[in-house]
Amino acid sequence: MRPEQFWLADRQDVSGETPVHPLPIAFLCIAAVLCLILWAQNAGPLGTAYDGVRQPPLRIDLAAPVAAPPQVEPLVLQALDPDSARRINAQTPFTQEPVPPAQPFRITGSVQDRARATDCLAAAIWYEAGTESLAGQKAVAQVVLNRVRHPAFPKSVCAVVFQGSERPTGCQFTFTCDGAMARKPSAAVWSIMQGLARIMLTGEVFRPVGTATHYHTEWVLPAWSGTLDKVHKEGAHLFFRWTGWWGKLAAFRGRYAGAEPIIPQLAGLSPSHMGAAASTDLMTDEAQILAEDNKTAASLGIAPNPYGFIPALQNSAGDYLVFILPRTADAGLMLRLVLFSCGAKPYCKILVWTDAKAAPYRFPITDDQLQSLSFSYLRNRSAGLDKPLWNCDVYPRPDTNQCMKTRKAPTSTGAAPAIGSASPSA
């Protein structure tokens, strides 16, 4: 008998059949698993052939929620007097977690849609923060844009601002349903609000509020305020974001619809919301829009200014501008210069003189000339700067934080520091 016959005979059961040996099967299974691993490492996503470039492994974000976005609740205020609300709000701590800034929002769509979005955002800025500082107005605008990007809210600017306005209660922005729109801004103020709205819609970001989607004034206490992360205070407003994943930057992936509804409540302020027939004459490009803005501003008290919006000095990059205005120019004109001249530039510096004799007509600007400065503005997005300052001897301001620092007298050790700088990198 051959050796292999002894091996088989030793392993036959009583039925005479030869059982299957487990070791060869185990070896085959291990080999198959190794082949699958090697194939997966060299294959593209979903099994596509290897193209010479190693594809990154598929990663699943386990922190992403499986539930639907949080519900947007109507504004319900707790029955508290203003002093009690202020005290409770002050005791609520700010979040200790990072507050990353939102991504820039750049509007798309037709000219009509962009005009409607601009006026809806301008209305939210004025009715919600018309008495706030420029920073406070930008903060409110940022919340609107954050909502457009969040999956819990509509996907157009006008739909976000006027969400729930068809109900006497439950609107998201109270001015849209409490009768406040019976009060209209002046043409000059409305022009400023439109300019600010355009800047926010073309890439400006107000960083301190991060991804906030809610805010309220400090003298009221909404029912939801205790359930959200408190992230920032700007003026009289407190700003909040959702807790957990839905408040993080990764959640803000909603795509702007690009189609803005007509809002009949805005017809008295906005031709673009008067219907299709009334909006056919809207401007067709940004240059025309800017030209119309300048023309409107000139008709609103800027006509006596012989310089218009033409800078007396500017650097080669066009982001460092000097204006010389008459003494009759009001403080609001300074902000119009910012809005119309800086646009969405990441860096912009504006200096304004109302004393033509003391103003500079060439670079470099001296310390003596800077001492007579009436207004300055500096934007440097890389450094998070966005600061308008007035010479409060010329333009008294209710908020002293908006005043330039008083220049100290020269000392024996050298000249006092100037209140401005001739270097665009300052």
Image (cartoon, grey):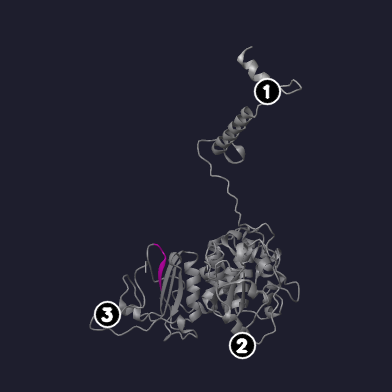
- Vertical placement of 23 versus 279: above or below? above
First-in-chain label (3 vs 1): 1
Secondary structure under badge 3?
loop
Q: According to the image, label 2 marks what residue?
A: 83
Q: Label 3 sits on what residue type?
A: Ala
Mark 3–mark 1 Cα distance, whole angstroms, equals 106 Å
Q: Residues within 10 Å of mark 3 (few under 14, many from 20)?
A: few
Disc number lying in front (3 or 1): 1
The amino acid on which the numbered mark 1 sits, given as a three-letter code, is Arg
| Mark 1, residue position | 11
Please tell me which residue lies in front, 248 or 162.
Answer: 248
- Residue 212: x and y, percent? 59, 69
> Residue at left 32%, top 73%?
365
Residue annotated with mark 3: 415
Q: CA distance from mark 2 to mark 1?
A: 93 Å
Q: Residue at x 73, y 23 (%)?
A: 13
Q: Quadrant of residue 220?
A: bottom right
Q: Residue at x 71, y 77 (%)?
A: 76
